[in-house]
Image (cartoon, rainbow, N blue to C red):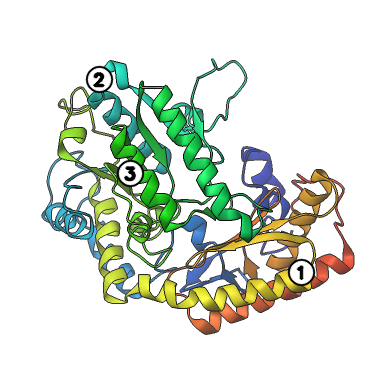
Amino acid sequence: MLRNQASVEEFELLASGVTPGFAAAPYQFTHGKGARLFDADNNDYIDFCAGTFTNSIGHAHPIAVKFMQERIAELWNIHDYSTPLRIKLLRLLNEMTPEHIDTFQFYTGGSETIEAGLRALHSYLPPERAKIVSFAGAYHGKTLGSRQLFGWQFPGESDCDITRLPFPDKFGLPAEQKNAYEQHCLELIESYFANDLHIGAVIYEPVLGAGGNLNASPLFWKQFNQLCKQFGVLQFVDEICVGFGRLGHDFSFQQYDIEPDLVAFAKGIGGGFPTMCIGGRKEIINAKPFGEKGGASTTFGGNPLSLAAMYITIQIYQQEQLAANAKDLETQLKDHVEKLASAFPDIFDFRVTGLMATLNLKHGTEEETKRFALTLHRHCLAQGVKVMTFDHLFRIAPPLNISTTDLDEGLNRMFAAFELTTQQGAVRTDSENLCPSV
């Protein structure tokens, strides 16, 4: 066994449904600093997925480390009871969000937060307007309720009739056709709203994160807002992947002048710690039964350590102006991605929004593309850059405080990995190989 890889015993004891990237290249990391990870031999790897869109302030930020070391000696879990820090954090969130987003509750993961929002909406909406719709191509989590929103069913689960609205962007769509396609989608959405008066709310990501960084124009979202108001449809905005500075604003809905009624806050708001939050109009979040005592509570959500991680992450994020940094680095990221796309025809299409990019790969058949992507993933790690790969999608989302030097170096390492992959081809015949040797 190599010192930078997981052991055979670990694979035997670990569930097989781990991420395909780890399954293909089971590297083991020992510590991190800033935008870099390190293995037992002190080899460095630039982290181009910030954990999994979570480590917005990088790894082991010294201010956060000191703050959390002090907090861990104080309190761990006291359920919903108060701490001196909770009111400070609530004030921060209240200041960052629009005036009408004035009530908050804390959770530990994205799916749990989405499920809480669905419970709040079903508590508030009248029975005749209780239908919640989503967008095609979206991703909202792995629990039963969150999966039903985008049609991911397991064997034996009953079918759930969820209307999925057309999203106004797709890979392969020529730029000159995008405006017309957006208008076509708006017409279809208006038809859905007009012909199904049971629709009371819509859940969506302003940019489809897991769907490939697909996005719509500000004009589309302006007209979509108007349609929601016209038909009395509430807006539940899922910021989990794309919020908290990732696009150059505190929250992605601000970039598009969206007026949400309910918001699930981003992975990055906890700096890598399992802590998330939902915010919304008081009349929605306090509606019963969700608003009844215990209706919104959770075992670990809002525990003192989680709140501390969220609080110090927001403090660092604001002090270091990380949203502005993400926006400033967008051009640098886009320039590199355009060079990659020009040099390697296996990049079928790409999207860059803020400090986030997705490369859509196409290398022969669907299965050949998967093998190519996983081989590319292995070569990226071998070159010292950690990325996120899922089927044909190759995603880049480094920490918000990554330096221009680290961003350049990581993208150059990616370029070298693409060269190796195109020269050698997809060397494995099994696209889901779990062998610990690389």
The label nearer to you, 1 versus 3, is: 3
Q: Where is residue 347 in the image (x, y as percent from the top left)?
A: 74, 62
Rendered image: mark on residue 418 = 1
Q: Could one spot residue 438 in this view of the protein?
A: no
Between marks 2 and 1, how big is the CA–CA gap? 53 Å
Q: Quadrant of the N terminus?
A: bottom right
- Residue 72 is drawn in which quadrant? bottom left
Q: Could one spot residue 97 in this view of the protein?
A: yes
Read off the residue under disc 2.
126
- Which residue type does callout 1 highlight? Phe
Read off the residue under disc 3.
226
Is 56 above or below relative to 203? below
Question: Which of disc 3 and disc 2 is earlier in sequence?
Answer: 2
- Identify the residue at image location x=32%, y=77%: 320
| Disc 1 + disc 3, Cβ < 8 Å | no
Is 437 above or below relative to 279? below
Q: Where is residue 401 in the image (x, y as percent from the top left)?
A: 42, 74
The label nearer to you, 2 versus 1, is: 2
- Which residue type does callout 3 highlight? Gln
- Identify the residue at image location x=80%, y=72%: 419
Question: Which of disc 1 and disc 2 is earlier in sequence?
Answer: 2
Crowding around mark 3 (Cα neighbors within 10 Å: few <14, some 14 to 19, many 20+) is some
Is 168 above or below relative to 166? below
- Which residue type does callout 2 highlight? Pro
